[in-house]
Amino acid sequence: MSEENKFLMPNEPQKFTRKDFDNILLHMENIGGSDVYLQSGDQVIIDVSGFKRKVTKKPISIDSMEVITKSLQGDNAIGRLNSGEPIDDELEIKLDINGELRRFRFRLNFTGTKKHGKDSIQATIRSIPVTPPPLEKIGLSRDHFIYKNFFPMQGLVVVTGPTGSGKSTLMASCVAELISEEFANRVINTYEAPIEFVYDEIYSPSCLVSQSSVPQHVSTFKRAIENSLRRKPEIIIVGEMRDAETIAAAIEAAQTGHLVIGTSHTNGVPETIRRLINTFGAAERESRQADIIDSMQLIVAQRLLKTTDEKRVAVREHLKFDQKTKERLLTSNALRINVETRKILEEKNISMLEEAREKYEQGIILESDYIDLENTFAFEKEK
């Protein structure tokens, strides 16, 4: 069987129904995929370890995409998409795997598009393991520096990386490990859009985890943090810290004795600090720079790179904000704080590029991915 044909979906239908959609998800599980891409007028594509595999011979029709969209999101879904409202949701179903019904979770996005001059729909379906993977499976352990510093008593911890880099997985695996400890004794409130990993199948002898979806259960991440302060948690987890109001609320919670853990979409530790500061207007950046650095405890940046055996492996960089690091960054110009932070990482020999270089020299990752990463960080180096 050719490389192309071995990924094809068996018994491909002429038109896709909701049942056929479930079969696509089942096929993704069978071939070890992580994401399905559906677009009117194109073949169905499944991401397998970063490689985009076409799994149907024929393109999916506009009618089939509308049938699938309505069956998952209701009869008004097409109108919402055509009026400029993308749809984000989660899906939990049971699929038959070798005669056994197993629970599966997925993150969904539907977006209106244009294809061949006609209104079209593009859907991205991301597989989410029901229970977070153990630390060992993502290259960490209880003794790893990142996990040992992931849950300080208070302050900010940020996990960052581009879309699909495993941020949520890393965060959820750390939470799962913590709540399984006998004497952890934490109340944890999570706010996500939508909820991804769940913890209801993990035995927790001393922790309470409460998960809320934004905007279903609470309207915004800012209001979620404000709400959480009334619920007496030790840990507040924020799905995404991307606007000034959310970041300001997170800082306030961190300064009042809570641990706030959140995610951001940046390329690395240095860019994360600059992005958080630059979210605010020019008039308040200086004061916010001081607040952010003073509250920050740990930033972990992660990417997934393709390996030579057609899998993916995480490469990371992390920075613990000890007093010396904070003093150095507090005196740095906000416009060049990323350059100063990159210097710190390189001095400590803990940059993502250094970890990627080691994996490349060991023959683990593809040369193309290593070069792309090298080019990504080139702009942060001084001329």
Image (cartoon, helix red, strand yellow):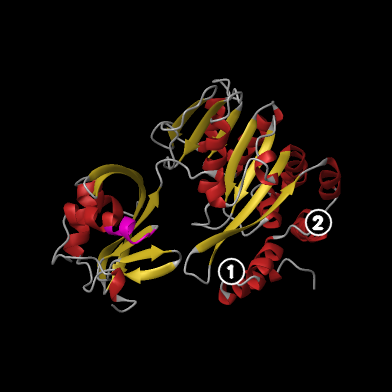
Residue 7's mark?
Answer: none
Residue under circle 1? 364
Q: Quadrant of the C terminus?
A: bottom right
Residue at the bottom extreme?
2
Q: Residue at x 21, y 46 (%)?
A: 99
Crowding around mark 2 (Cα neighbors within 10 Å: few <14, some 14 to 19, many 20+) is few
Where is residue 55 drawn, in percent x and y? 28, 68
Please provide percent x and percent y for residue 257. Answer: 69, 26
Residue at x 69%, y 29% (from the top left corner):
153
* The stretch drawn in magenta includes residue 32: yes
Residue that protrudes farthest toward the front in the picture: 98
Q: Secondary structure at mark 2?
A: helix
275 relative position to 201: left or right? right
Q: Toward which corner of the image does residue 339 lie, by quadrant?
A: bottom right
The relative height of residue 17 versus residue 287 in the rendered view (above or below) is below
- Amino acid tagged 2: Lys
Residue 76 visible to an observer of this rendering: no
Which residues are drawn in magenta?
27-33
- Number of numbered discs visible in the structure rendering: 2
Q: Which residue is mark 2?
A: 348
- Residue for point 59% across, 76% down: 367
